[in-house]
Image (cartoon, rainbow, N blue to C red):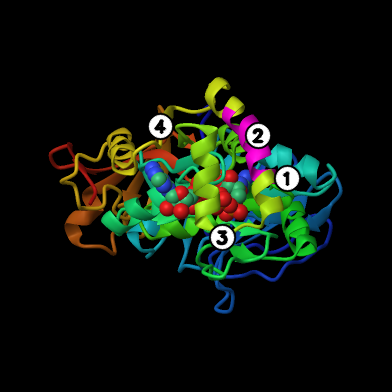
């Protein structure tokens, strides 16, 4: 993480050199990097989420940037720390444990790519929720139509309902008779989906069998917010996009025992017309070729006999058949006390607790280790570590 970060505590903003006076909102913070001042707006009692605005000194203008990702809910106050000149760490006060650590990305690769997508001159920032430790990675499952992806995923979700959640994709294809909007897919219009893609709402998207399919960032966030491990059923193009994104995942390709068996399964399912079946079978050849030989996938599973394949899937996911508890409970956090001071040493943010807490707490400090950050927008930022240090004994203990 680079040089000493800038710290900022709820500085009410007043006036700026260009004469632009901004209404000072309660509990907002300002971080300056280069010729830009990033203001994270606190709660004004009306907004439901933290807002962002930027003062550009070179143009002496205030700008409201395009803000990507799920926004943190409004809070009573926050601490802002600039890390590595490319992102701001936000520590929320009085937030629930799974909602207290956030990153606002200013100049990461993802933000730069999104700026290019928005024409190059638009200011873009992206939120990414911070999670402690190495939360379980999402699982990407690909394979040709009819190979049994949905069947395997349903079995997994039925056996481990508290452990896995399905990423509900958007698609422009028509619903099948047994499919429910918002459950199997978000069924949508092409023009609407194209606009949302342009607005940066999608982690990935692809044209498959003549229709548009895509995973929205929100679809993945919703599952992670439930403390569950996200499963994505997406095609090989989508898997390649996710591989190229900051989202770290396990990639699994399901292959059929033969093309004849694939055709038999597709027909037996009875959900496609003859023309659609032919198209899916033609596409299956290319998908198999790419799935098997591209090196994209961490695991390739034969779905010959269903139970056997399901057992192998469980093995690669580290499930021994007896595990029932969620491996990824809602990430632990801490309630930021009244802050006295903060400093940085060797990638550790040291926050001294305030005196309004218990007498003893005034002697405590919290250490946030940011040396092993991974991932980031358009997903979670993992690898944060958090300790409480009691200065009486200098004893280190984990904050729970
Ligand atoms: N890239 C991408 N592919 C998707 C997404 N959702 C579904 N797909 C893929 O689209 C293909 C067609 O899906 P679908 O119409 O449900 O047919 P099925 O796979 O035969 O059940 C499959 O290969 C899915 O994995 C998505 O969000 N993104
Ligand atoms: N191992 C298997 N052996 C026989 N039939 C299977 C097997 N796996 C899945 N099927 C069946 O094949 C059809 C297609 O499976 P599905 O899960 O819908 O595929 P996908 O989601 O990959 O398109 C379904 O009717 C399903 O019951």
Q: Earlier in the sequence, mark 4 or mark 3?
A: 3
Residue 321, given in percent of the width and then of the height, sits at 19, 44
Marker disc for residue 71: 3
Marker disc for residue 109: 2
Q: Is residue 55 visible?
A: yes
**Is 115 drawn above or below residue 201 in the view shown?**
above
Mark 3: which secondary structure? loop
| 4 vs 2, front mark | 4
Give the residue pinned by disc 1.
36
Name the residue located 70 percent from the left edge and 44 percent from the top edge. Answer: 279
Residue 265, given in percent of the width and then of the height, sits at 49, 47
Q: Earlier in the sequence, mark 2 or mark 1?
A: 1
| 2 vs 1, front mark | 2
Q: Earlier in the sequence, mark 3 or mark 1?
A: 1
Mark 2: which secondary structure? helix
Name the residue located 40 percent from the left edge and 56 percent from the top edge. Answer: 165
Name the residue located 33 percent from the left edge and 48 percent from the top edge. Answer: 352
Give the residue pinned by disc 4.
301
What's the CA distance linking mark 2 and mark 1? 18 Å
What's the CA distance linking mark 4 and mark 1? 50 Å
Mark 4: which secondary structure? strand
Q: Is residue 153 found left or right of 82 in the rendered image?
A: left
Specify few, some or many for label 4: CA neighbours under 10 Å numbering under 14, 14-19, or 20 or more. some
């Amino acid at each position: 993480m680079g040089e000493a970060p800038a710290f900022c505590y709820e500085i009410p903003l007043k006036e700026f050199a260009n004469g632009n006076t901004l209404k000072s909102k309660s509990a907002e913070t300002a971080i300056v990097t280069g010729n830009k001042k990033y203001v994270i707006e606190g709660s004004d009692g009306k907004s439901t989420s933290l807002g962002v605005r930027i003062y550009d000194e070179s143009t002496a203008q205030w700008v409201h940037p395009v803000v990507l990702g799920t926004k943190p809910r409004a809070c009573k106050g926050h601490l802002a720390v600039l890390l590595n000149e490319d992102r701001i760490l936000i520590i929320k006060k009085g937030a629930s444990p799974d909602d207290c650590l956030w990153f606002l990305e200013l100049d990461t690769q993802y933000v730069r790519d999104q700026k290019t997508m928005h024409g190059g001159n638009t200011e873009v920032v992206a939120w990414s929720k911070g999670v402690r430790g190495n939360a379980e990675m999402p699982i990407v499952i690909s394979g040709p139509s009819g190979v049994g992806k949905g069947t395997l995923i349903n079995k997994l979700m039925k056996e481990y309902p508290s452990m896995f959640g399905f990423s509900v994709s958007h698609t422009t294809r028509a619903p099948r008779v047994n499919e429910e909007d918002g459950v199997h897919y978000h069924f949508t219009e092409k023009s609407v989906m194209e606009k949302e893609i342009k607005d940066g709402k999608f982690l990935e998207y692809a044209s498959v069998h003549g229709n548009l399919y895509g995973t929205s960032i929100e679809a993945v966030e919703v599952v992670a917010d439930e403390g569950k491990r996200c499963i994505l059923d997406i095609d090989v193009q989508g898997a390649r996009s996710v591989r190229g994104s900051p989202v770290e995942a396990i990639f699994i390709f399901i292959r059929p025992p033969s093309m004849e068996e694939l055709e038999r399964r597709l027909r037996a399912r009875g959900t496609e017309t003859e023309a659609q079946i032919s198209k899916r079978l033609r596409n299956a050849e290319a998908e198999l070729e790419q799935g098997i030989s591209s090196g994209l996938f961490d695991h390739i599973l034969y779905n010959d006999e269903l139970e056997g394949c399901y057992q192998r899937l469980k093995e690669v996911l580290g499930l021994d058949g007896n595990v029932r508890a969620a491996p990824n409970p809602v990430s632990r956090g801490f309630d930021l006390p009244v802050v006295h001071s903060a400093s940085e040493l060797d990638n550790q943010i040291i926050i001294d607790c305030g005196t309004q807490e218990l007498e003893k707490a005034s002697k405590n400090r919290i250490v946030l280790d940011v040396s092993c950050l991974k991932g980031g927008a358009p997903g979670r930022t993992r690898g944060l570590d958090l300790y409480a240090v009691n200065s009486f004994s200098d004893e280190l203990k984990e904050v729970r």
